[in-house]
Amino acid sequence: MSRMMGLFDLEKHFAFYGAYHSNPINIIIHIIFVWPIVFTALLLLHSATPICDPSLLGFPQSLTLDGVLRLNVGFIVTVVYALFYICLDKKSGFVAALMCFSCWVGSSFLAARLGPSLAFKVGLASQLLCWTGQFLGHGLFEKRAPALLDNLVQAFLMAPFFVLLEVLQSVFGYEPYPGFQARVNAKVESDIKEYREKKQIKKNKIT
């Protein structure tokens, strides 16, 4: 039960990811690039073999005649992400879920329009550009390795939701519950302090 509760502990997840993204410029870079990574990842997954006919689940036949919407790996990933975000926080999670499905639908139509070969090239080029931008953000501004190097699954799951919450908090002052931001900030500051102390100890040992 405790593991299950920990899985849906938004404060814990947000603090973990926030400790690797405290620099304002790095945060802006991630806001720009994270959701395009989601979109182009689904673009790359569009060519995967469909699991079943989408029309069987109620999708309009007009959308499925040319195999545009495919219930494949990309669709499963979309559902998993959407449900996970809703479990973390119903309001912002619902917004994130809509964005996930929008990315799936949009990437599906783009892939169908471009064709398999061009869609793959566009998706791959976009992934390289976005990931390069993020790594530069960490190297030049954050001065800390990306979160994925410490927890790959958590980093990939939380990245889209993290940047969405950052925007909702900054623009609309949204909090999943009162005191959320203050509690997260305290944990982030504690983590960063611990990281810097460990880094300094290693540096002292070398010198």
Image (tube, helix red, strand yellow):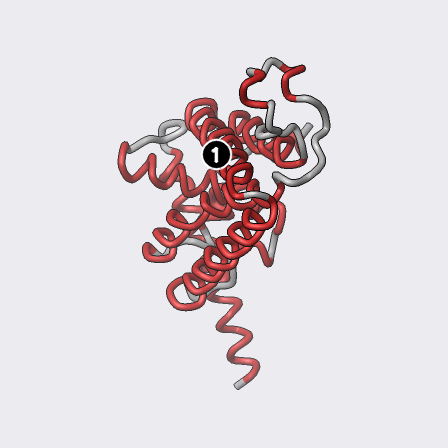
Can residue 12 be seen at all in this image of the molecule? no
Can residue 30 be seen at all in this image of the molecule? yes
Horizontal side of residue 200 vs 75, given as left or right: left
Q: How many marks?
A: 1
Viewer-proximal residue among 107 and 30: 107
Amino acid tagged 1: Gly
From the viewer's perspective, is residue 139 above or below residue 29? Answer: below
Label 1 packing within 10 angstroms: few (<14), some (14-19), many (20+): some
- Callout 1: helix, strand or loop? helix
Look at 64% across and 21% down and name the residue there: 54
Q: Which residue does the numbered mark 1 point to in the structure image? A: 106
Viewer-proximal residue among 204 and 135: 135
Q: For the view shown, which residue lies furthest in the bottom direction? A: 207
Look at 53% across and 67% down and name the residue there: 198
Horizontal side of residue 52 vs 46, given as left or right: right
Viewer-proximal residue among 107 and 169: 107
**x and y, in percent, of residue 111 in the image:** 54, 40
**x and y, in percent, of residue 206 in the image:** 56, 83
Quarter where residue 141 is shown? bottom left
**x and y, in percent, of residue 133 in the image:** 43, 60
Quarter where residue 92 is shown? top left
Viewer-proximal residue among 97 and 197: 97
**x and y, in percent, of residue 204 in the image:** 51, 80
